[in-house]
Image: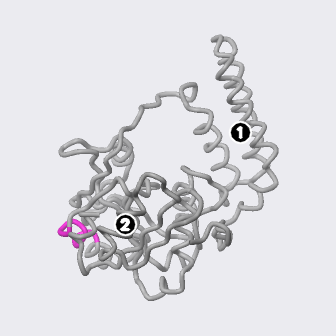
């Protein structure tokens, strides 16, 4: 919240609390309340995407040109935020801009390092990328007007990648501003191959395929099931039976919930995924 204090009058601040039980709500409603324009303590942890959808769906969003997404474990200085905003004002072809993410002073975030390594060369200080994780996003509100909300089919993780995919299909560009710095204070575990992926992460990969509006559903389902079969065979030969069992449970979930997934194979999504029971 000290980062928000530093941004001052440049932003109106919206905080969504996902039913925390660690005293965060008391801090937000007490010590930091004067920094918060709108505060929504949800009754249930609905996950990253749905929590943002709740805000995107508020009537006051239409009064803003940009929505700035900032993780609770992320920060940006006022000069860097001003530089990011200035770049968005001059590079109107970009629907989304993000700073270069560092996980600590001088240490580049591993994921962003990978994005930059595979990105096009910088043009006027911006490197176009197909995706950058949503820890620090400056999102043009017109993008929300055009494609709607995060896909509510994702419990947690994957929703930002799906949103970025839909943005690109709709004709928007995504970029990282090379001379703007942000911090995402997280520890990442490197995964070099699919065998090392958690069952949950492997399931998210399949889900991303099925709801990608740029791909055919039938082929996405076949590729995903085939990936599971290959993975299971390899794990069995390695004697990792417990891991096989966990992956098979997620495969069963994938197949059981497939009709619901297919329903969200859309470019434009207006369903927030929030129920009345979730609301403050």
Which one is in front in this view, the residue at disc 2 or the one at disc 1?
2
- At mark 1, the secondary structure is helix
Q: Which quarter of the image is occupied by the C terminus?
A: bottom right
Task: Identify the disc placed on residue 28.
Answer: 2
Q: Quadrant of residue 6?
A: bottom left
How packed mark 2 is, by other alpha carbons closer than 10 Å (few <14, some 14-19, many 20 or more), is some
Q: Residue at x 32, y 44 (%)?
A: 109
Q: Is residue 139 left or right of residue 271?
A: left
Image position of 131 (left or right of 230): left
- Residue 277 belongs to magenta span: no
Q: Residue at position x 61%, y 52% from top?
A: 155
Q: Give the position of the N terminus as an image quadrant.
A: bottom left
Estimate the x, y position of residue 191 in percent, counting from the top left: 47, 30
Range drawn in magenta = 78-84
Please name the colour scheme applied to the rendered image.
one colour
Residue 224 badge: 1
Marks 2,1: beta carbons within 8 A: no
Percent of width and height locating residue 82: 22, 73
- Does residue 83 belong to the magenta stretch? yes
Dot 2: element: helix
Q: Splitting the image into 4 quarters, where does residue 106 fall?
A: top left
Q: Quadrant of residue 65?
A: bottom left
Mark 1 surroundings within 10 Å by alpha-carbon count, few (fewer than 14), some (14 through 19), many (20 or more)? many
């Amino acid at each position: 919240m000290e980062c928000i204090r530093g941004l001052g009058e440049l932003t109106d601040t919206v905080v969504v609390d996902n039913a925390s039980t660690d005293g965060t709500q008391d801090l937000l409603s007490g010590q930091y309340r004067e920094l918060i324009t709108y505060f929504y303590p949800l009754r249930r942890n609905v996950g990253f995407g749905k929590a943002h959808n709740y805000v995107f769906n508020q009537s006051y969003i239409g009064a803003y040109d940009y929505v700035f997404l900032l993780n609770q474990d992320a920060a940006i200085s006022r000069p860097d935020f001003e530089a990011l905003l200035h770049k968005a004002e001059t590079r109107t072809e970009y629907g989304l801009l993000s700073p270069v993410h560092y996980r600590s002073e001088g240490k580049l975030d591993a994921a962003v390092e990978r994005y930059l390594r595979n990105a096009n060369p910088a043009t006027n200080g911006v490197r176009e990328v197909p995706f950058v994780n949503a820890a620090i996003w400056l999102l043009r509100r017109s993008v929300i007007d055009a494609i709607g909300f995060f896909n509510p089919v994702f419990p947690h993780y994957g929703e930002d990648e799906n949103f970025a995919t839909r943005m690109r299909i709709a004709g928007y560009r995504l970029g990282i501003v090379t001379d703007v710095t942000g911090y995402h204070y997280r520890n990442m575990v490197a995964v070099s191959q699919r065998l090392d992926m958690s069952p949950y992460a492997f399931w998210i990969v399949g889900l991303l395929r099925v709801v990608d509006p740029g791909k055919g559903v039938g082929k996405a389902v076949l590729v995903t099931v085939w990936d599971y079969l290959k993975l299971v065979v390899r794990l069995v030969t390695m004697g990792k039976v417990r891991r096989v069992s966990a992956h098979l449970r997620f495969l069963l979930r994938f197949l059981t919930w497939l009709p619901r997934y297919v329903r969200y194979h859309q470019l434009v999504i207006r369903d927030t995924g929030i129920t009345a029971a979730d609301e403050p």
